[in-house]
Amino acid sequence: MRFLASDQLEGRGTGARGYDVAAQYVASQLESIGIAPAGGAGTYFQPVPLRRLEIVPERSSLVVLSAQGTVKKLVRGVEYVTLGDATRVAVDVEAELVSVGFGITAPESGHDDYAGIDVQGKIVVQFFGAPKKFSNAVRAYYADPATKMRNAVAHGAVGMIWVFPPEVAKEMPWDLCVGLANAPGYRWLDASGTPHDGFPELKTIAFVNRSGAEMLYAGAPQTLIDAVDAADADHHSSHALATKARVHTETKHTAIASLNVVGVLQGSDASLRTEHVVYSAHLDHLGIGEPVDGDAIYNGAVDNASGVAAMLAIAKAYASLPVTPRRSILFVAPTAEEAGMLGSDYFARFPTVPRASIVADVNIDGAPGLLYPVADVVPLGAEHSTLGAVAANAASDLGLAVSPDPMPEQSSFARSDNYSFVKAGIPSVCVIEGLKTRKPGLDPAAVMRAWQMSKYHSPKDDMSQPLDFESAATTTKLNFLIGYAVAQAAMRPSWITGDFFAQRFASR
Ligand SMILES: [Zn+2]
């Protein structure tokens, strides 16, 4: 963890030298432990072809045209930001605007923001998130930007503008949003060089803040706040706006190849060894970026040097067993997680072993328990499959309680590499720490909140912060035991019958 998080690795940015050094390091570690190469061509590496998108801010613009013919040019970074275009280096669009609530069509929940509204050839303006009535799993799926973009395209929209409802804006400061939009975006490319989830039909994807949004809603039948309130209260509130937008976007495209690192420990059972239990822990972080207090290296110590280190410790434990487990164990360190779980998505679609042979994914994103002595864990996503019982048994063996997700509204389950496996129909779990502690007088919720506000995705997530390695060792044992139980069981894990994700993805 200390090496991966060191300044020498420069934050392991996707496509950067520090990441490539980290990939070589993990491969060397796997080799020294006795884990065989499984990336392809006899190596530990699966190259992931990527396109990097960098917006050219000085040559991009967003103009709002009112019904009275007035023209208002919004100030980039202050009132709006646009994202880079995945398929074009320059693109223009001018279209009418339609407010479409959350932009969600969820027939099984009886919710359709597009009902009775025509967005053909128009730009949809929509709120970040999902209605409160949705269960956690349903929310995770429908709040996913890719799901929303697919839905907008299916309805014929030609652009998308995101608005943050006040509640979301509290958690998602505008500066953070601007930083995200200005950072390079990435897409993986298929064999024909086409970006996956490129959505060429959408000729602009933009964010506006409150004042930008109020300009879009000028003269509309509902004010911005009325529209947000209606969407929150789950009243159908979609309506045409009185304004149009004209957007020009220029994007620099760069082709890069980044490496997933993959190793395998052969199983011992003559028939079950053809099946694989996957451990995944993303190796990338945010690289070098905006300096904070004079430090521009985003070391990503907890996120996710710790997860990779935990996975290597688990690999070492497996390799030291007198008899290897019955099923084979695959260790995967994906690239480009921070860029949208791209390395894992690529791996789950083009795995280096037959996809049907992958029985489960145990993902580690931040070795749980590093911030305080944990007394409970949250096995994110385990409730969708028989992995729930596996995780509960393993936790009880270690004296750890199992708790439900304390922040379901953040859809954490859909925000790490385990979700790439779920989308490929593979039962997955990602254990995070719960909010109980063995240390009297400590408030874990306050510790966690302070960490998220001051260290998460900041250069301050480095090795100088206080870290509880004993606590993280316990959760690493837990992740070992979960994978071990799956590798030994006669039956592979299965989805819970009727589960939302099972219905959507299990047949893939
Ligand atoms: Zn992470």
Image (cartoon, rainbow, N blue to C red):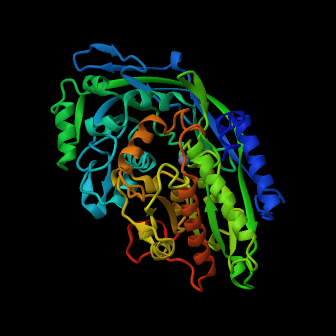
Residue 430 percent across, percent down from the top left: 51, 60
Q: Is residue 403 left or right of residue 369?
A: left
Q: Is residue 100 visible?
A: yes
The front one of 323 and 242 is 323
Q: In this picture, is 373 found above or below 87?
A: below
The front one of 461 and 91 is 461
Residue drawn at x 43%, y 66% is: 504
Q: Is residue 107 left or right of residue 93?
A: left
Residue drawn at x 28%, y 27% is: 210
The front one of 235 and 309 is 309
Q: Is residue 94 visible?
A: no
Q: In this picture, is 238 found above or below 263?
A: above
Image quadrant for the C terminus? bottom right
Which quadrant of the structure image shows residue 247?
Answer: top left
Q: Is residue 435 left or right of residue 356?
A: left
Residue 322 percent across, percent down from the top left: 76, 78
Residue 128 percent across, percent down from the top left: 34, 41
Residue 449 percent across, percent down from the top left: 38, 43
